Image (spheres, rainbow, N blue to C red):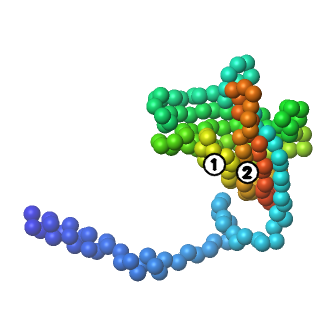
Amino acid sequence: MAALTLFIFSLLVSTTIANEDFQNIQCTEKEERPAFQALPLQLDADQKQFYFHVYLHQIFDGDKKNTITAISPNSDFPKFGQISIMDAPLWSYLNQTNLIARAQGVSMQSDQKTYGWHMSFNIEFEMKELKGSTLTVMGRVLELTTPREFAIVGGTGVFSLATGQICGRRLSSPDESIWTELKILGYYTPMKKPDW
């Protein structure tokens, strides 16, 4: 038994790698490029700015409902764990005459002490010039406070590599729906798309 223990100990000692061996590891570059590659940022990129002033309209009841509660695990204040799904229009005016885009995503009641919601959604553009382009948005909403702020964390189509900020404020509404005024300001970098 002592011989077996001594053998295992010597095996462990012989296969132990010193920290300095890790520090001396060098990467050799192959002539072929890998499928993924990180390159230095080119500071002369053709970055462009965009701005939208729109109105989000969320409807919770009736035939035109566009925001629903998908999960509501409890009825305690503040309904921690509640998840809502939305597919709500973004209008250029409060009179709903010009549809700019749709906000599609989820809201999650993630605060155990107050009405604090985490929101993640895509702005899917409907206007002809931007059809199929999107902005990806994330942020926190305190239901009873204003203003609210979201981060633009990405984009597709026209808005490739988008970053920016959305500032919003809840407006008064004559019914149970919610109108939110949004000012969207950001930057994007046009990218060459693959030929396929």
- Secondary structure beneath dot 1 equals strand
Q: Quadrant of residue 27?
A: bottom right
Residue at image mark 1: 139
The reply to whether the C-beta atoms of the residues labelled 2 and 1 are less than 8 Å apart is yes
Amino acid type shown at disc 1: Gly
Identify the residue at image location x=67%, y=71%. Answer: 31
Q: Amino acid at mark 2?
A: Ile
Residue 161 in the image, given as x and y percentages of width and height? 74, 57
Question: Is 56 rendered above or below residue 177?
Answer: below
The image position of residue 91, as x and y in percent, is 83, 37
Residue 62 seen in the figure: yes
Mark drawn on residue 166: 2
Q: Number of callouts in the render? A: 2
Residue at (59% x, 28% y) in the render: 69
Q: Is residue 165 left or right of residue 110?
A: right
Q: Quadrant of residue 18?
A: bottom left
Q: Residue furthest left?
A: 1
Say which of 157 and 61 sits in front.
Answer: 61
For the N terminus, which image quadrant?
A: bottom left
